[in-house]
Structures are given as C-alpha cells and as structure tokens.
Amino acid sequence: MHKKSLIPFKIETLDPMGQGVSKIGEQITFIAKTLPGEEGDAEVARKRKQVQFANLIKVTQPSSIREKSPCPHFWQCSGCHYLHTSYENELNFKKESLGKIFRDWPGQLIDLHPAPRRVDYRNRVQLHYDLNANKLGFHKSQSTKIIEVPSCLLPLGPIREQIKNLYQNESWIKLASRTGEKEGHVELYLKDNEVSLAWNKSYAEGGFTQVYSEMNELMKAWIPQQFHKDSYEVLDLFGGNGNISSSLKYKKRFVVDYYNKPTEAEFLSQDLFHENAVATVKSALNFVPNLLIFDPPRSGVKNLEEWTQAFNPETILYVSCDPHTLARDLKSLGNKYKLEKLNLFDFFPSTFHFETVAILSRAY
Ligand SMILES: C[S@@+](CC[C@H](N)C(=O)[O-])C[C@H]1O[C@@H](n2cnc3c(N)ncnc32)[C@H](O)[C@@H]1O
C-alpha cells in the first residue's frame, strides 16, 4: 500500500473553522486540532488548487494553552473543534474569528455571551448509520466515513443515555434494519422530557427548536433589553415557532416560515427564498412593520436590501448562524442602516459554530 508522507508544520493562526493554518512555501495547509505556534507533523489528506488539508499526526512543540481533551472521541471525531484548549480560549478564538470577518466595519465591538456549560447541552442530535459497514455515529469531516461516538459529551443526559443504549449489544442494528434502508440517520431529540428517535426523517423532526435551550432563554431575556418601545410592529422572518419575536413587547406580530408554525401568532407559510417572497409577504400583512427579524439558515438572506426597501423598517434584528453570510447581507445595505454592536451568543460550545445577533437602526 502507498504510504503517505509526513509534512512538518508550524501553525500561524486558526481559521474560522478552528483549523490551524500553516504556510509551507506557497502552500497553505489546514490542520484541525492544532493551536497557534504549534509545530509537528501532519499527513496530507486532500489537496485543492491552492490549499491542502492534513491530519495531525504528532505535535512536537505543543502550545502552552493545549489541554487534554475531556472527550474520548475528540481525535477521531470531527464534531468538536476546541476541546484541546480551555473554554476561555475557545471563546477568544471565536471572538477573533468574528472580528476578522467584520474587520472592515469601523470600530465594530463584539459583546460575548458565553454558555453556562461547554458540554451536556444539545437537546437534539443526528447520528448516521451504515448497515454494510456496521457503523453508527457522526460523519467524518468531508467524508461519508462514520466515526462511532458512544460517549459523545455534547447531548443532554437523557440523550446520552439513549445513545449508549443504541450502542449496547449493537441494538441500533435491529432498529435501523426495520427502516429497510441500508444507510440513513437517526435523530434523537428531547421533547417534554422524553427522548424521541426519528429514523430517516428530515431534520428537526417534531419542529425546529434551538439546540441549546438555556442559551436560547439567555438570548430571549437579552433581546427585550435592547428594545425599549412597546409599539413594535414585528415581522418575524424564518420565525419557526415564533421563538424570537415572542420575547418582545409588541403591538402587532406576524411570523413567516416554511416548515414550522407558531401556536399563537399571525402566521404565513411561505418559501422565503422564492423570487416573489417579498411581494407575497407584503400582500399578506395588514400593517407596516417597523421591526424586521431575520433568523435564516446558514445561506443567509441574499436579498436583504429588497426586504428593507419593501418595508423601510426603523430596526432590524438579524440572528445568524453563519457570520460570513451575515457580513455579506449587511454589506448590501450600505450606509442606510447603522450596526451598533455584534453579539456573539455561544449556542454551540466546543465547536466552531456560534450565533451572531446584529441590531441595526435606520440611519436616514
Ligand atoms: C435558524 S431557524 C430559526 C427559527 C426560529 N427563528 C427560532 O428561533 O426557533 C431557521 C428557520 O428557517 C426556516 N426555513 C428554512 N428554509 C426556509 C425557506 N426556504 N423559507 C422559509 N423558511 C425557511 C426553518 O423552518 C427554520 O424554522
């Protein structure tokens, strides 16, 4: 078998995905689970035109901030990215990464909202299975290879118990076989203190909810402190069950989502990426909103400007799980809206993900 050669590395910085970046000659190499200043050996796994991705083999010069990971799967699994250093360092890396993305915004300040717990928080987890390979677990990054994770630390206790049960005596095999599909996934989610298992259903079975319930409560307690009027007429786009707008004092509220539905709010089911979405929502409304809320999937809202032109809101609250698309979308507004502060809410500790909450006021 062809043996891959080792390359020596020195890490200069971390990228937004928590991967170490090493420059050897003109070649940029990304190596996960390394830290700035570290040296060692890595093995190239994938090459693209300008860059390559390598697996860490050995650290010869460890960083002083390196720590032993509390998770037994950390080295094989691609689910967590920062468990080899403290939570404080993780937060600093995240803040730095957000700051870099918004570096062109003059005097931009970032307020950090850390999580109460770094592990033991997810109320929903998706595992993949492959009956031919006899494996249940998470996909390895950029691959369909499955890494087994019987002791994953991120889910809440009752879900961790269920995951253990699935691995015990390989009981998952019987359950997965019943689906009739050789490959698929199972979603474990907590609802009314019970763990439910959904085999091969689309994501967020049982309705979308934020995966870190306590962080969601923190965000919802913080939002009304930023909005002092009680005359908001709110249009909550990508509103799900109305989670975000429900935290506000409002005069009127209208929620739009395609896949979920609030129990108590005026609501429209609409594909918000459809080319006529703005006009359709406008004609469904019987008021002119002065506050627009956006909480889109990672792809963001490419036509943010079209929405603001249609409603000319005084205020925009944009909750984003991808700071790159957030920056792209906010840029499209030019000087018409002023971004006061960025708020980093750490909804996904141990991983490179987080939520950014931006509040913008109309400048003229
Ligand atoms: C990040 S979640 C936010 C949900 C809600 N704001 C909350 O805090 O629970 C994104 C929401 O966008 C909805 N969504 C995804 N694609 C959509 C589309 N094309 N049109 C409308 N809604 C969509 C999902 O159903 C989901 O509820």
Image (cartoon, grey):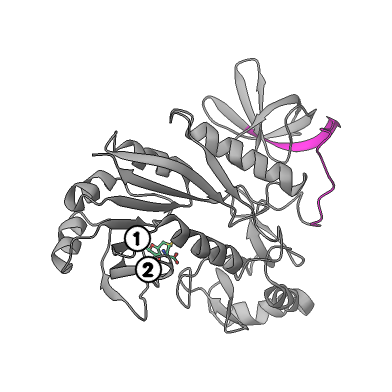
Closer mark to the observer between disc 2 and disc 1:
1
Return the disc, 2 or 1, that comes first in the chain's sequence. 1
Q: Residue at x 48, y 68 (%)?
A: 203
Image position of 182 with respect to 89: above or below: below
Q: Say which amino acid is labelled 1.
A: Lys
Q: Nearer the viewer, residue 20 or 317?
A: 317
Q: Nearer the viewer, residue 280 or 246?
A: 246
Instruction: Note whether residue 142 is visible.
Output: no
- Of the four image quadrants, the one with ligand 1 is bottom left
Q: Nearer the viewer, residue 151 or 47?
A: 151
Classify residue 28 as left or right of residue 244: right
Distance from mark 1 CB to nearest ligand 1 atom below 8 Å = no
Give the extent of the magenta segment.
53-71
Q: Residue at x 63, y 66 (%)?
A: 122
Q: Nearer the viewer, residue 284 or 107?
A: 107
Q: Is residue 63 magenta?
A: yes
Classify residue 221 as left or right of residue 146: left
Q: CA distance from mark 2 to mark 1?
A: 8 Å
Q: Residue at x 72, y 45 (%)?
A: 88
Q: Is residue 105 magenta?
A: no
Classify residue 282 as left or right of residue 201: left
Mark 1 is surrounded, within 10 Å at the Cα level, by few (under 14), some (14 to 19) or many (20 or more) other residues, namely: few
Question: What secondary structure is found at the residue carrying circle 1?
Answer: loop
Q: Which residue is mark 1?
A: 229
Res 125 → quadrant: bottom right
Residue 249: mark: 2
Image position of 102 with respect to 205: above or below: above
Question: What secondary structure is found at the residue carrying circle 2?
Answer: loop
Instruction: Note whether residue 22 is visible.
Output: yes
Horizontal and vertical percent position of residue 134: 69, 67
| Callout 2–callout 1 Cβ contact below 8 Å | yes
Q: On the rendered image, what quadrant is the C terminus found in?
A: top left
